[in-house]
Image (cartoon, rainbow, N blue to C red):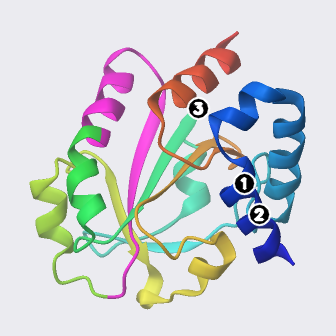
Amino acid sequence: MNDAYKYTFNTYLNDMKCVNKNETFYKSIAAKLSALEAVPIGSTIANTDMQKLDKTMVKLSDIYAKSKYTFVMFYDPECVHCQEETPGIATYIASLKNSGVDIQSVSYLNTPDDKKWATFVKEKGLESWINVKSKNNDRTYVEKLEISSNPNFLLLDSQGKVLSKKYNQQEIAKILMSIKN
């Protein structure tokens, strides 16, 4: 049922025509769909054990608790979209940090093949990010977070609450401004 609901929403309702016609209706349908997701907006993300690029272990909660915001990007070095989008994303997150936003950035290797991990980090400008992968390449987080495709994104607050599940500069700026006030 969940898949049918998502298909109907994404095929027939998730466009500007629907939003412009009746924004209240659109938002209520989007909220219902979000409630069916594994990690809906407003929920707290499950804590996970991760291995950093330097082989040390870290918990996700130890990361997001250190800043007001944490931006997480899930990626695969062989994903064409990841290769194309990552430099711009890295530049945008750096600009937020440089403008005084208390935000951390985490790049999460979303594949069990870590051969190209360090090279991708260096080539795409992610050296200042917290670079992690799942502990022992355990992929159970993929189903828990519904992030089988790449790239995927999460914006978290300092409590691990999910504020956004996509990379959109205008939406991120809007969220950051609304919480500041």
What's the CA distance linking mark 3 and mark 1?
36 Å
**Where residue 12 is drawn, which disc sits there?**
1
Q: Tell me where residue 38 appears, x and y as whole percent.
A: 75, 68
In the drawing, does residue 58 fall left or right of residue 79?
right
Residue 15, relative to residue 178: is it above or below?
below
Q: Tell me where residue 115 appears, x and y as whole percent.
A: 17, 84
Q: Quadrant of residue 176?
A: top right
**Where residue 86 is drawn, which disc sits there?**
none
**Residue located beneath label 3 in the image:** 68
**Residue located beneath label 2 in the image:** 8
Instruction: Identify the amino acid type marked 3.
Output: Lys
Residue 155 inside the magenta-drawn segment? no
- Asked if labels 2 and 1 touch by Cβ distance under 8 angstroms, the answer is yes
* Near-viewer residue (8 or 123): 8
Give the magenta range.
Answer: 89-112
SS of the residue under disc 3: loop
What's the CA distance linking mark 3 and mark 2?
36 Å
